[in-house]
Image (cartoon, helix red, strand yellow):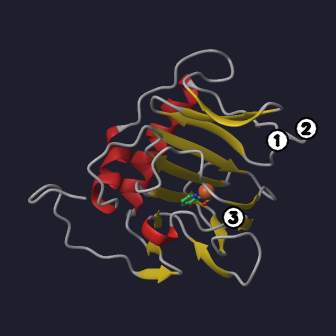
Amino acid sequence: MRKNGEQMNNSRPTLALRGVQVWQGLLDRPAQEAIVQSIRSIVAAAPLFSPMTPYGKPMSVQMTSAGRFGWVSDRTGYRYSEAHPRGTAWPAIPASILDIWGKVSESDRVPECCLVNFYRESAKMGMHQDRDEAEFGEPVVSVSLGDDGLFRIGNLTRGGKTESIWLKSGDVVVMGGDARLVYHGIDKTRSGSSSLLNGGGRINLTLRVVT
Ligand code: MD6
Ligand code: FE
């Protein structure tokens, strides 16, 4: 929990869906452009790769990370790693991205991983829980940039009724508290819906405390 006087924030999420907070339009266009610039330097130091699922099929989303830990996936499974698949350390999480965590997370920890997901046309992400972290008391914060993405929110167990929302460029999602372990995924993106990224596509950043 936040200590008195630390990082006070008087804004509020615009929407809550099954306990998942959505801060629509939290980042204006200049803020989005600045973050895209910092993602370019992350990708220069730690190139995007297509993780292999344990089933031997590449994911449709390309990934890289910043921070002490990055998320990797290969035939031995999914895990956090202190090295990029090519063997190098991950770059630091840029301050402009850490600032978003400070605004919305209500945490006094610092994120140790910023996972960068890049969706080209027709990429999607199946329903999953984020449960490779040690501390489920800490939220996961996500930032959407570029094309709209159809975000589906389910339940604490697989299956059942779901609700969906289009996430737009500049929207921030906080998955914490009772909603920390809900199943969620991206069904599709709306190609050409944003002019933010040269060449189109969608970027989603997820900030996590890992240890
Ligand atoms: C995406 N997001 O928006 C995928 N996970 O592309 C996630 O998987 C996610 O948005 C945890 C918390 C928030 C998220
Ligand atoms: Fe997730």
- Decide: few, some or many residues near mark 3? Use Cα within 10 Å; few <14, some 14-19, many ≥20: some
Indicate which quadrant contains ligand 2. bottom right
Q: Secondary structure at mark 2?
A: loop
**Residue farthest along the top direction in this orientation:** 87
Left or right side of 26 for 20: right
Quadrant where the C terminus is found in the figure: top left
Task: State the residue position of label 2.
Answer: 56
Quick check: 85 above or below 120?
above
Quick check: 108 above or below 9?
above
What x and y, as percent, mark residue 145?
54, 57
Q: Looking at numbered disc 2 in the image, what kind of residue is underneath it?
A: Gly
**Residue farthest along the right direction in this orientation:** 56
What x and y, as percent, mark residue 63?
66, 40
Q: Secondary structure at mark 3?
A: strand
Mark 3 or mark 1, which has the lower sequence index?
1
Q: Looking at numbered disc 3 in the image, what kind of residue is underneath it?
A: Gly
- Decide: few, some or many residues near mark 1? Use Cα within 10 Å; few <14, some 14-19, many ≥20: some
Viewer-side residue, 69 vs 22:
69
Q: Which residue is rendered at x = 43% and y = 44% of the image?
A: 209
Check mark 3 vs ligand 1: CB closer than 8 Å? yes or no: yes
Question: Which label number is shown at residue 53?
Answer: 1
Q: Gap between marks 3 and 1, in whole Å?
A: 16 Å
Left or right side of 98 for 48: right
Q: Which residue is rendered at x = 46% and y = 28% of the image?
A: 68
